[in-house]
Amino acid sequence: MLSDYITSAIATLLVVADPVFLSALFLGITNGMGQAQRREVALRAAIIAFCILLAAGLGGAKLLDLLGISLSAFRIAGGLLLLSAAAEMVFDRRSQRLQATAEQAISVDHVKNIAAFPLAIPLMAGPGAITAMILLAGRAEGRMEYLVSLYVVAALVMAGCFICFIMAERISKLMGITGRAVMTRLLGIILAALAVQFVIDGVVALARTAA
Protein backbone atom coordinates (compact mmCIF):
# COMPACT_ATOMS: atom_id res chain seq x y z
CA MET A 1 0.00 0.00 0.00
CA LEU A 2 1.10 3.54 -0.73
CA SER A 3 0.53 4.66 2.86
CA ASP A 4 2.78 1.89 4.21
CA TYR A 5 5.45 2.81 1.66
CA ILE A 6 5.33 6.50 2.63
CA THR A 7 5.53 5.62 6.33
CA SER A 8 8.55 3.41 5.69
CA ALA A 9 10.23 6.11 3.60
CA ILE A 10 9.66 8.78 6.26
CA ALA A 11 10.95 6.57 9.06
CA THR A 12 14.03 5.41 7.12
CA LEU A 13 15.16 8.78 5.78
CA LEU A 14 14.34 10.66 8.97
CA VAL A 15 16.30 8.22 11.10
CA VAL A 16 19.26 8.09 8.72
CA ALA A 17 19.43 11.89 8.36
CA ASP A 18 18.84 12.48 12.11
CA PRO A 19 18.16 16.26 11.88
CA VAL A 20 18.20 16.79 15.66
CA PHE A 21 21.68 15.29 16.05
CA LEU A 22 22.97 17.17 13.01
CA SER A 23 21.76 20.44 14.50
CA ALA A 24 24.37 20.04 17.24
CA LEU A 25 27.11 19.52 14.64
CA PHE A 26 25.76 22.49 12.69
CA LEU A 27 26.42 24.75 15.67
CA GLY A 28 30.03 23.63 15.81
CA ILE A 29 30.58 23.88 12.07
CA THR A 30 29.12 27.39 11.83
CA ASN A 31 30.73 28.68 15.01
CA GLY A 32 31.48 32.39 14.68
CA MET A 33 28.97 32.97 11.87
CA GLY A 34 26.11 35.44 12.06
CA GLN A 35 22.44 34.44 11.87
CA ALA A 36 22.18 35.40 8.19
CA GLN A 37 25.28 33.39 7.29
CA ARG A 38 24.00 30.35 9.17
CA ARG A 39 20.66 30.57 7.40
CA GLU A 40 22.39 30.73 4.01
CA VAL A 41 24.63 27.76 4.83
CA ALA A 42 21.65 25.74 6.10
CA LEU A 43 19.57 26.48 2.99
CA ARG A 44 22.37 25.66 0.55
CA ALA A 45 23.20 22.45 2.41
CA ALA A 46 19.55 21.30 2.34
CA ILE A 47 19.24 21.99 -1.40
CA ILE A 48 22.53 20.25 -2.25
CA ALA A 49 21.67 17.22 -0.09
CA PHE A 50 18.22 16.92 -1.68
CA CYS A 51 19.74 17.03 -5.18
CA ILE A 52 22.14 14.24 -4.20
CA LEU A 53 19.31 12.08 -2.84
CA LEU A 54 17.16 12.84 -5.89
CA ALA A 55 19.97 11.72 -8.20
CA ALA A 56 20.41 8.54 -6.15
CA GLY A 57 16.70 7.76 -6.39
CA LEU A 58 16.50 8.47 -10.12
CA GLY A 59 19.74 6.87 -11.30
CA GLY A 60 20.70 4.39 -8.62
CA ALA A 61 18.81 1.43 -10.08
CA LYS A 62 20.14 2.11 -13.59
CA LEU A 63 23.68 2.21 -12.25
CA LEU A 64 23.14 -1.16 -10.57
CA ASP A 65 21.94 -2.61 -13.88
CA LEU A 66 25.05 -1.33 -15.64
CA LEU A 67 27.22 -2.95 -12.99
CA GLY A 68 25.29 -6.23 -13.23
CA ILE A 69 24.09 -6.05 -9.62
CA SER A 70 20.57 -7.26 -8.87
CA LEU A 71 18.29 -5.14 -6.73
CA SER A 72 17.84 -8.07 -4.34
CA ALA A 73 21.59 -8.29 -3.76
CA PHE A 74 21.75 -4.54 -3.20
CA ARG A 75 18.88 -4.75 -0.73
CA ILE A 76 20.85 -7.25 1.33
CA ALA A 77 24.10 -5.26 1.11
CA GLY A 78 22.30 -1.98 1.76
CA GLY A 79 20.44 -3.46 4.71
CA LEU A 80 23.72 -4.61 6.23
CA LEU A 81 25.20 -1.14 5.69
CA LEU A 82 22.22 0.49 7.40
CA LEU A 83 22.51 -2.08 10.20
CA SER A 84 26.13 -1.02 10.68
CA ALA A 85 25.04 2.62 10.83
CA ALA A 86 22.39 1.68 13.39
CA ALA A 87 25.01 -0.06 15.55
CA GLU A 88 27.13 3.10 15.44
CA MET A 89 24.15 5.14 16.65
CA VAL A 90 23.28 2.75 19.47
CA PHE A 91 26.86 2.44 20.72
CA ASP A 92 27.62 6.16 20.16
CA ARG A 93 30.35 5.62 17.57
CA ARG A 94 28.49 7.54 14.86
CA SER A 95 28.63 10.85 16.70
CA GLN A 96 32.38 10.54 17.20
CA ARG A 97 32.98 9.74 13.52
CA LEU A 98 30.76 12.56 12.24
CA GLN A 99 32.28 15.01 14.71
CA ALA A 100 35.76 14.10 13.46
CA THR A 101 34.62 14.62 9.86
CA ALA A 102 33.16 18.00 10.70
CA GLU A 103 36.28 19.17 12.54
CA GLN A 104 38.50 18.11 9.66
CA ALA A 105 36.37 20.05 7.20
CA ILE A 106 36.42 23.18 9.35
CA SER A 107 40.20 23.15 9.43
CA VAL A 108 40.36 22.86 5.64
CA ASP A 109 37.75 25.46 4.69
CA HIS A 110 35.55 27.15 7.25
CA VAL A 111 33.12 29.13 5.13
CA LYS A 112 33.45 28.88 1.36
CA ASN A 113 32.28 25.30 0.73
CA ILE A 114 30.95 24.40 4.16
CA ALA A 115 27.40 23.88 2.90
CA ALA A 116 28.55 21.26 0.40
CA PHE A 117 31.14 19.60 2.66
CA PRO A 118 30.71 18.40 5.31
CA LEU A 119 27.05 19.43 5.76
CA ALA A 120 25.39 18.21 2.55
CA ILE A 121 27.76 15.29 2.11
CA PRO A 122 28.58 13.20 4.06
CA LEU A 123 26.53 14.45 7.04
CA MET A 124 23.06 14.97 5.48
CA ALA A 125 23.32 12.84 2.33
CA GLY A 126 25.84 10.28 3.43
CA PRO A 127 26.24 6.63 2.39
CA GLY A 128 23.33 5.56 4.59
CA ALA A 129 20.88 8.09 3.14
CA ILE A 130 21.98 7.41 -0.45
CA THR A 131 21.64 3.66 0.10
CA ALA A 132 18.21 4.14 1.64
CA MET A 133 17.07 6.21 -1.37
CA ILE A 134 18.18 3.53 -3.82
CA LEU A 135 16.51 0.79 -1.78
CA LEU A 136 13.26 2.73 -1.42
CA ALA A 137 13.25 3.63 -5.13
CA GLY A 138 13.67 -0.07 -5.89
CA ARG A 139 10.70 -0.95 -3.70
CA ALA A 140 8.60 1.47 -5.76
CA GLU A 141 9.04 -0.90 -8.74
CA GLY A 142 8.58 1.90 -11.25
CA ARG A 143 5.18 3.04 -9.93
CA MET A 144 5.07 6.78 -10.48
CA GLU A 145 2.94 7.64 -7.45
CA TYR A 146 5.37 5.76 -5.20
CA LEU A 147 8.43 7.49 -6.69
CA VAL A 148 6.84 10.93 -6.47
CA SER A 149 5.94 10.23 -2.84
CA LEU A 150 9.54 9.19 -2.14
CA TYR A 151 10.95 12.41 -3.58
CA VAL A 152 8.42 14.49 -1.65
CA VAL A 153 9.43 12.67 1.55
CA ALA A 154 13.11 13.32 0.80
CA ALA A 155 12.34 17.01 0.27
CA LEU A 156 10.41 17.17 3.56
CA VAL A 157 13.22 15.47 5.48
CA MET A 158 15.78 17.92 4.06
CA ALA A 159 13.38 20.76 4.94
CA GLY A 160 13.27 19.30 8.45
CA CYS A 161 17.07 19.42 8.58
CA PHE A 162 16.96 23.07 7.50
CA ILE A 163 14.48 23.94 10.23
CA CYS A 164 16.55 22.10 12.86
CA PHE A 165 19.65 23.99 11.73
CA ILE A 166 17.86 27.31 12.05
CA MET A 167 16.61 26.34 15.52
CA ALA A 168 19.88 24.60 16.50
CA GLU A 169 20.59 26.79 19.54
CA ARG A 170 17.08 26.31 20.97
CA ILE A 171 17.20 22.54 20.36
CA SER A 172 20.60 22.31 22.05
CA LYS A 173 19.35 24.14 25.15
CA LEU A 174 16.08 22.18 25.25
CA MET A 175 17.44 18.65 24.87
CA GLY A 176 20.90 18.88 26.35
CA ILE A 177 23.56 16.21 25.93
CA THR A 178 21.55 13.50 27.70
CA GLY A 179 18.43 14.09 25.61
CA ARG A 180 20.33 13.89 22.33
CA ALA A 181 22.09 10.72 23.47
CA VAL A 182 18.81 9.01 24.37
CA MET A 183 17.13 10.02 21.12
CA THR A 184 20.09 8.89 19.01
CA ARG A 185 20.01 5.44 20.59
CA LEU A 186 16.26 5.10 20.13
CA LEU A 187 16.57 6.10 16.47
CA GLY A 188 19.41 3.60 16.12
CA ILE A 189 17.16 0.76 17.29
CA ILE A 190 14.45 1.82 14.82
CA LEU A 191 17.00 1.97 12.00
CA ALA A 192 18.29 -1.50 12.93
CA ALA A 193 14.76 -2.92 12.59
CA LEU A 194 14.30 -1.23 9.20
CA ALA A 195 17.69 -2.52 8.04
CA VAL A 196 16.80 -6.09 8.99
CA GLN A 197 13.55 -5.73 7.01
CA PHE A 198 15.55 -4.67 3.93
CA VAL A 199 17.75 -7.77 4.31
CA ILE A 200 14.71 -10.02 4.69
CA ASP A 201 13.09 -8.50 1.58
CA GLY A 202 16.28 -9.11 -0.40
CA VAL A 203 16.60 -12.74 0.74
CA VAL A 204 12.93 -13.43 -0.04
CA ALA A 205 13.30 -11.89 -3.51
CA LEU A 206 16.41 -13.96 -4.23
CA ALA A 207 14.65 -17.11 -3.05
CA ARG A 208 11.75 -16.43 -5.40
CA THR A 209 14.13 -15.84 -8.30
CA ALA A 210 16.01 -19.06 -7.58
CA ALA A 211 12.77 -20.99 -7.35
Image: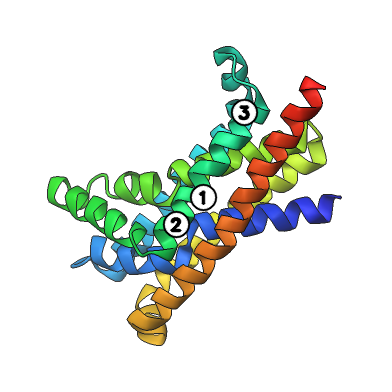
In the depicted structure, whether residue 21 falls above or below residue 125: below
Q: Are marks 2 and 1 in contact (CB under 8 Å)?
A: yes
| Mark 2 burial class by Cα count in 10 Å: few <14, some 14-19, many 20+ | some
Q: Residue at x 60, y 36 (%)?
A: 76
Looking at the image, residue 1 sits to the left or right of residue 49; the answer is: right
Q: Amino acid at mark 2?
A: Ala
**CA separation in Å, label 2 and label 1:** 6 Å
Q: Residue at x 58, y 21 (%)?
A: 64
**Element at badge 3?**
helix
Q: Determine the image quadrant of residue 143.
A: top right
Classify the position of the C terminus by image quarter: top right
Q: Which residue is mark 2?
A: 87
Q: Residue at x 83, y 50 (%)?
A: 2
**CA separation in Å, label 3 and label 1:** 15 Å
Residue 134 spot, x, y in % from top left: 60, 36
Q: Which residue is mark 3?
A: 73
Residue 92 spot, x, y in % from top left: 35, 64
Which circle marks residue 83 in the picture? Answer: 1
First of labels 3, 1 by sequence position:
3
Q: Residue at x 51, y 50 (%)?
A: 83
Looking at the image, residue 17 sits to the left or right of residue 138; the answer is: left
In the depicted structure, whether residue 145 falls above or below residue 46: above
**Element at badge 1?**
helix
How many numbered discs, if any?
3
**CA separation in Å, label 3 and label 2:** 21 Å
Q: Amino acid at mark 3?
A: Ala
Residue 82 spot, x, y in % from top left: 51, 47
In the depicted structure, whether residue 113 falls above or below residue 211: below
